[in-house]
Image (cartoon, rainbow, N blue to C red):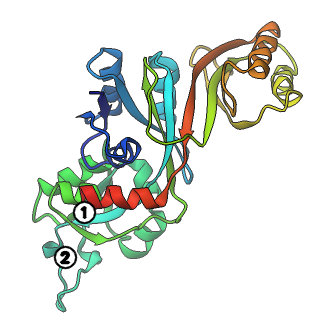
Amino acid sequence: MKRIALLPSGSVSHEAILYLLNGESAELIHHKLISDVFMSTVEGRSDYSVIPIENTIEGSVSLHMDWLVNEVDIPLQVEWVYPSRQNLIGDASEFRGEDGSVDLRKIKRIYSHPVATAQCRQFLSKYVPEAELEPCGSTSEGVKIVKENPGKSWAAIGTSLGASTHGLNILSDNITDHDNNYTRFVLIGHQPVEVSRSPEHVKTSILVTLPEDAPGALHQVLSAFAWRRLNLSRIESRPTKKKLGNYYFYIDIMDSADSVLLTAALGEIEVLGCQVRVLGSYPGFAYEREKTKGVAARHS
């Protein structure tokens, strides 16, 4: 049985891995901090780790990207996309108005992960503008904090799975600002993973560090892909943390690492004096709405 490390029970990561597993059994090992999720696999206490790395609204999750690049050396084995549907969660009995309905203006403080909070700015500004916003390590941790502090008029932003896990109510559902709020997850580990559905694509992720004082080096790198008609789905610069002004480029290529064209492109880039590190070559799975409904039903 696979051992999979992830953020706490009831988090978006938890919902997302249930979707990917699609009923297949696995031992889920929950951790409070994303650093512990990474280190669980580094130290052999789990076979894989679930890492959210990109969101359609907020872009890259920079902390997680930096861990993948600077702190660990574990290949990416699978990627998949899952919707981040956030809800306002609490004990409804604490917020009843005179007519018996929930009065969100009674909420004094809201806990959640900063990325989830940022995804709900418009709702928070409109309906709970006076509430204090408190960051925490994950959405499920915020729900747990609210559960453990009854009577304080606190609420949390989190998943429906998180609400049911901790026995709280959904005060307002689907409060994200945009309907197309999806998160890209990767599963990192030392062994390939078999998933019981056909992948939408195969992708290779690399890091490229340019030689110093080489004018036009980035253009030459991109040209190596362009003339071979290799599709780049993402390119992002991040500081190397070694010297001010030095950056590496994270690039996703829509091809397998062992393809003739990509192998040749990487060879050309290295000849230019660039350092190339392959983070992984892996299948990618698109979100399938009808299957997610089944997952929600089984774990609600």
When the figure is inspected, residue 172 is found, relative to residue 269, above or below; the finding is below
For residue 27, side relative to residue 181 (left or right): left
Q: Percent position (x, y) of residue 219?
A: 85, 26
Task: Provide the secondary structure element on which disc 1 rests.
Answer: strand
When the figure is inspected, residue 61 is found, relative to residue 248, above or below; the finding is below
Q: Name the residue under label 1.
A: 155
Earlier-in-chain disc, 2 versus 1: 2
For residue 23, side relative to residue 65 (left or right): left
Q: Percent position (x, y) of residue 42?
A: 35, 16
Q: Percent position (x, y) of residue 196?
A: 44, 39
When the figure is inspected, residue 277 is found, relative to residue 16, above or below; the finding is above
Name which quarter of the figure residue 206 lies in: top right
| Quarter of the rendering occupied by the N terminus | top left
| Marks 2,1: beta carbons within 8 A | yes
| Quarter of the rendering occupied by the C terminus | bottom left
The residue depicted at 14 percent of the width and 60 percent of the height is 167
Tell me if mark 2 has few (under 14), some (14-19) or many (20+) residues whose alpha carbon lies within 10 angstroms of its own.
Answer: many
The residue depicted at 84 percent of the width and 32 percent of the height is 229
Instruction: Give the residue type at disc 2.
Output: Phe
Q: Which of 157 and 81 is in front in this view?
A: 81
Name which quarter of the figure residue 161 lies in: bottom left
Q: Nearer the viewer, residue 242 or 226?
A: 226
Q: Percent position (x, y) of residue 227?
A: 89, 28
Q: Which mark is residue 170?
A: none
Task: Provide the secondary structure element on which disc 2 rests.
Answer: helix
For residue 254, side relative to residue 125 (left or right): right
**Separation (CA) of disc 2 from disc 1:** 10 Å
Q: Which of 131 and 221 is in front in this view?
A: 221
For residue 261, side relative to residue 288 (left or right): right
Q: Is residue 61 visible?
A: no
Q: Name the residue under label 2.
A: 95
Instruction: Give the residue type at disc 1.
Output: Ala
